[in-house]
């Protein structure tokens, strides 16, 4: 029988460790359930809108509190059974317990609220979220920290929510299921080889991460070890053993990261067996993907969003398009096939090298890639762009980039973002004084089972 509270503490008197009964009425941007009592808000992981829950208060602040789910009193109709046996511990997904339909509504609402609260748009029209066929098995790349357990066994997984406690995994329902056999077996091989595992607190040991990557359309795989020291005994022999064992594995790489840092990949990656890239088919093109450069983790969703962008732009063929933050040319190259000229700008030189190679492989000659920062290179363009595509990191565009966009003044801007808050902030600046009009907002579900949402905003001068 559910435990009930007979003397509910007043919100003004909340203390750490107390149990409170709360109705979850919303989901936060970080994925936690949100409950309200009086003028206090409490954030509760592992809950969903419609849950009535018994919650233990973990931290109490003047205006809000954080809690831990103690017991569900009434389950929400938006709640489902998690597909992962460690979903309540693993920090990889926040929303395994949330129905997929409600995830989509929550993400659309997240974009709407950011545009209202941060962007100052009174009644933003946000299109229904774009989705793919399945909320599982979508990740084409997974990078797992490694650890040695108290008994000495090699573990790989994700960190427990809010900690650096590793949750050991042998499979993951959100990664491409073809990668699962490698996860468990590679750990056993590392165990038998006796390679030392990195200890971050002491900054000792060698192996830091295991990265697995797959071309979802081709099935080709890459295996990459991130290590503090390149001198792993018999690495070349073991790399060839893995190639022989897994027919779809085309390359084994090692990335060198000797620094005391939470950055996963170092600056140098070497191929020890096979080839240093895999092939993927994307938007009718063949792309070569390396382990240390960026490609969207949800191949199918990225292609769905690209197709919508092309449709929304209604290109005539005479345009000049600039793709700022272009990466390896994922969107630049398909767009180049639709316009007169395309220019890609990317700060990471290795990505520019890959983009140029991908253009050559596909015979696309009306595109030029430049290595450098957007704020430096955009003002130096010798041709006025008709359209600028923006796809910055989560922190959004710098004030300098916003100012330069106003100066360059392209007729249209497409702003792709994985962070509704910084998107709304930047859209507000771009639309200041009527410089641009926000004409369409299209969210896309690149990250099912998490609270993250991708979004494309269309602006006209």
Image (tube, helix red, strand yellow):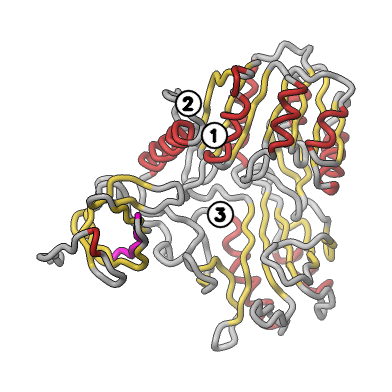
Rendered-image quadrant of the N terminus: bottom left
Left-right relation of 151 to 2:
right
| Image position of 258 with respect to 460: above or below | below
Q: What residue is drawn where x is 64% and y is 41%? A: 396
Q: Which mark is residue 121?
A: 2
Rendered-image quadrant of the C terminus: top right
Q: Which mark is residue 424?
A: 1
Mark 3: secondary structure: loop
Cβ–Cβ below 8 Å for labels 1 and 2? yes
Q: What residue is drawn where x is 22% and y is 54%? A: 52
Front in this rendered view, residue 268 or 362: 268
Q: Does the magenta stretch mainly form a helix, a strand or a loop?
A: strand
Q: What residue is drawn where x is 40% and y is 48%? A: 28
Neighbourhood count class around disc 3 (C-alpha, 10 Å): few under 14, some 14–19, many 20 upward:
many
Q: Where is residue 211, by image quadrant?
A: bottom right
Neighbourhood count class around disc 1 (C-alpha, 10 Å): few under 14, some 14–19, many 20 upward:
many
Please state the horizontal and vertical placement of residue 201, each as a whole percent of the image.
64, 80
| Residue 310 lies in the magenta stretch | no
Q: What residue is drawn where x is 22% and y is 63%? A: 20
């Amino acid at each position: 029988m559910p435990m009930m509270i007979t003397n509910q503490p007043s919100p003004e008197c909340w203390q750490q460790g107390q149990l409170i009964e709360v109705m979850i009425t919303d989901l936060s941007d970080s994925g936690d359930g949100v409950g309200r009592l009086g003028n206090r808000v409490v954030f509760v992981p592992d809950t969903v809108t419609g849950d009535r829950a018994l919650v233990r208060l973990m931290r109490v602040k003047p205006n809000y509190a954080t809690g831990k789910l103690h017991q569900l009193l009434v389950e929400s109709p938006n709640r489902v059974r998690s597909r992962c046996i460690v979903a309540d511990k693993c920090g990889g997904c926040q929303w395994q317990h949330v129905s997929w339909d409600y995830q989509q509504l929550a993400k659309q609402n997240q974009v709407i609220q950011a545009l209202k609260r941060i962007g100052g748009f009174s009644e933003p029209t946000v299109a229904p979220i774009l989705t793919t066929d399945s909320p599982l098995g979508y990740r084409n790349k997974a990078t797992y920290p490694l650890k040695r357990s108290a008994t000495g066994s090699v573990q790989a997984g994700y960190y427990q929510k809010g900690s650096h406690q590793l949750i050991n995994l042998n499979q993951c329902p959100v990664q491409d299921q073809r990668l699962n056999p490698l996860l468990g077996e590679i750990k056993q091989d590392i165990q038998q080889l006796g390679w030392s595992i990195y200890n971050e607190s002491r900054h000792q040991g060698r192996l830091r991460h295991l990265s697995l990557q797959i071309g979802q359309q081709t099935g080709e795989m890459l295996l990459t070890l991130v290590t503090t020291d390149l001198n792993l005994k018999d690495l070349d022999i073991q790399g060839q053993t893995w190639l022989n064992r897994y027919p779809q594995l085309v390359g084994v790489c090692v990335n060198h990261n000797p620094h005391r840092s939470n950055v996963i990949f170092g600056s140098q990656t070497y191929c020890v067996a096979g080839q240093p890239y895999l092939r993927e088919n994307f938007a009718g093109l063949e792309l070569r993907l390396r382990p240390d450069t960026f490609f969207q983790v949800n191949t199918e969703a990225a292609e769905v969003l690209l197709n919508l962008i092309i449709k929304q732009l209604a290109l005539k063929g005479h345009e000049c398009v600039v793709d700022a933050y272009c990466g390896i040319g994922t969107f630049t190259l398909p767009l180049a096939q639709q316009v007169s000229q395309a220019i890609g700008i990317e700060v990471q030189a290795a990505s520019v090298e890959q983009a140029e190679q991908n253009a050559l492989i596909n015979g696309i000659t009306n595109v030029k890639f430049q290595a450098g920062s957007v704020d430096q290179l955009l003002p130096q363009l010798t041709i006025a762009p008709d359209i600028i595509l923006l796809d910055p990191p989560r922190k959004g565009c710098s004030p300098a980039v916003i100012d330069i966009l106003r100066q360059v003044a392209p007729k249209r801007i497409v702003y792709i973002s994985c962070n509704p808050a910084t998107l709304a902030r930047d859209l507000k600046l771009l639309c200041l004084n009527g410089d641009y009009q926000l004409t369409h907002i299209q969210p896309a579900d690149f990250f099912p089972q998490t609270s993250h949402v991708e979004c494309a905003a269309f602006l006209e001068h």
